[in-house]
Image (spheres, grey):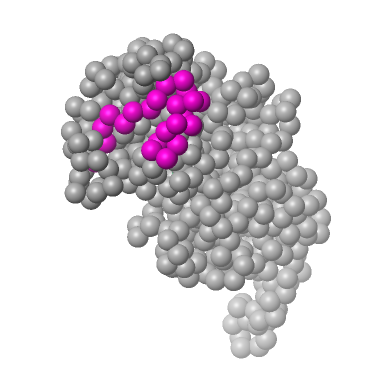
Amino acid sequence: MTGNGGREISVALLGCGVVGSQVVRLLTEQADELAARIGARLRLAGVAVRRPQRHPDVPGDLLTTDAAGLVTRDDVDVVVELVGGIEPVRGLLLTALKNGKSVVSANKALLAEDGAALAAAADESGADLYYEASVAGAIPLLRPIQQSLAGDRIVRVAGIVNGTTNFILSAMASSGANYAEALEEAGRLGYAEADPTADVDGYDAASKAAILASLAFHTRVTADDVYREGIRDVTAADIAAAKALGCTVKLLAICEQTDGAVSARVHPAMIPRSHPLASVSGAYNAVFIEAAAAGQLMFYGQGAGGPQTASAVLGDLVAAARNRVIGGRGPRDTAHAALPVLAMGETLTRYHVALDVTDRAGVLAQVAGVFAEHGVSIATVRQEGRGEAGRDADDGAPGPKDATLVIVTHSASDAALAATVEALTGLDAVQGVAGVLRVEGLGRPVTELGGTS
Ligand SMILES: NC(=O)c1ccc[n+]([C@@H]2O[C@H](COP(=O)([O-])OP(=O)(O)OC[C@H]3O[C@@H](n4cnc5c(N)ncnc54)[C@H](OP(=O)(O)O)[C@@H]3O)[C@@H](O)[C@H]2O)c1
């Protein structure tokens, strides 16, 4: 760093793709304004990429393929990492931090897997580690959790943190399309990658849940601690069943703190249409935070995209640069609470179960008995006649008509609910389980979920 009125903070950029190229653009276009805000000019010291020939917009003397050399250069103050993935980035960032460089990263996968090592390296050298863009793109979320709510006790963070899956589920809800059709549309419109695994199987959301839970509960939670279920198995029938209950289906990341423990999970769930998260559609993200004193808060906006994500990166870069100018440090990650992380089976959830049954006397009592045996209390039951001949009519005579029983439970351990569904499949009168989805009231009462008690 050189002094102001000539003062400079020198920035090394790793990666110049969708997000990195927008960071370069904003750094150039807003150079004077940023200098005024920081009290020093930001100088791009170098840009590390894999294929320099693909970056004609970046001055050739800045481009390098030697990222390792760039992050240890004496004149570099801040390293901005927009490469993604675990290696070689982990090694590069640990080296940068150990060498006293502040780090700004959007890398959810790395932060969720090994954020502890990065935070420890930052603590050791007194450098900053910022990663606002790693969760929910442009939406200011980590700083509010870490700073604005530092005096409160967060009890739940629940959100839609993956735009691809939200686009697919929204398309299924609005057009009645099935999963494969909606995925194809998402791909065509650029909302889904050629290999959509990270999104549709919930890996991306699980990394984000780990980061959110770690910050909200001052407890180290890694991606491996997060229960994960994607949206591949969500059917058009599930979406229709949700509608009938006054609900909509969303892929949620849910982090909770209860009774001295924390839990973090990602799965599709029905939520009441009256809940603010229900109206978040398309590729948008939103996160709902409940804190003991603040109550309910919601953060909404674009969770991805080059300029949008670059906005969050620039916010971090300005913070890190300001700290350099004044000689201070930003807030540190703290894991002092060190709460145990509950396994999914111990987590309290609610289920919506649709059972195809033979419509004859006593079936409802039998089904209710299975729930009771497993200590699961039923909130609502609805019966829909399907008007088909019963499958148990093996003598050729018309049998009892088939019906679908739609049951919504009260909260119970996920393990008890799963065992209940397993046991139901063994009943003679149960022809099949037409659908099982978790139901999340997210602070809303059960009565908002429709059906008859
Ligand atoms: N895209 C979004 O909307 C979004 C939103 C939130 C967070 N993020 C996160 O932001 C990060 C960057 O995402 P992106 O979409 O910008 O990725 P991207 O478009 O694929 O760009 C990756 C960049 O990294 C460079 N690179 C790859 N391996 C490298 C290596 N070993 N050494 C040096 N450079 C290397 C590539 O160089 P070449 O160009 O030469 O191949 C490319 O410029 C990821 O962590 C991602 O999760 C992205």
Tell me if residue 421 comes above or below residue 6 in the rendering.
Answer: below
Magenta region includes residue 44: yes
- The residue stretch that appears in magenta: 26-49
Give 72 or 155, whichever is nearer the viewer.
72
Q: Quadrant of the C terminus?
A: bottom right
Q: Which residue is at a point 23% across and 35% down the rendered structure image?
A: 62
Q: Residue at x 77, y 48 (%)?
A: 446
Check if residue 143 falls in the magenta segment: no
Residue 135 at what x, y percent from top left?
49, 39
Residue 219 lies left or right of residue 374; in this view the side is left
Is 78 positioned to the left or the right of 332 in the image? left
Residue drawn at (31%, 31%) of the image = 44
Q: Is residue 10 above or below residue 398?
A: above
Q: Work out whether residue 69 can be spotted.
A: yes
Instruction: Residue 332: give x, y in percent of width and height.
Output: 48, 18
Quadrant, the N terminus: top left
Whether 343 is drawn above or below 234: the answer is above
Percent across and percent down for residue 19 are: 39, 44
Front-lying residue, 178 or 62: 62
One can see residue 364 in this view: no
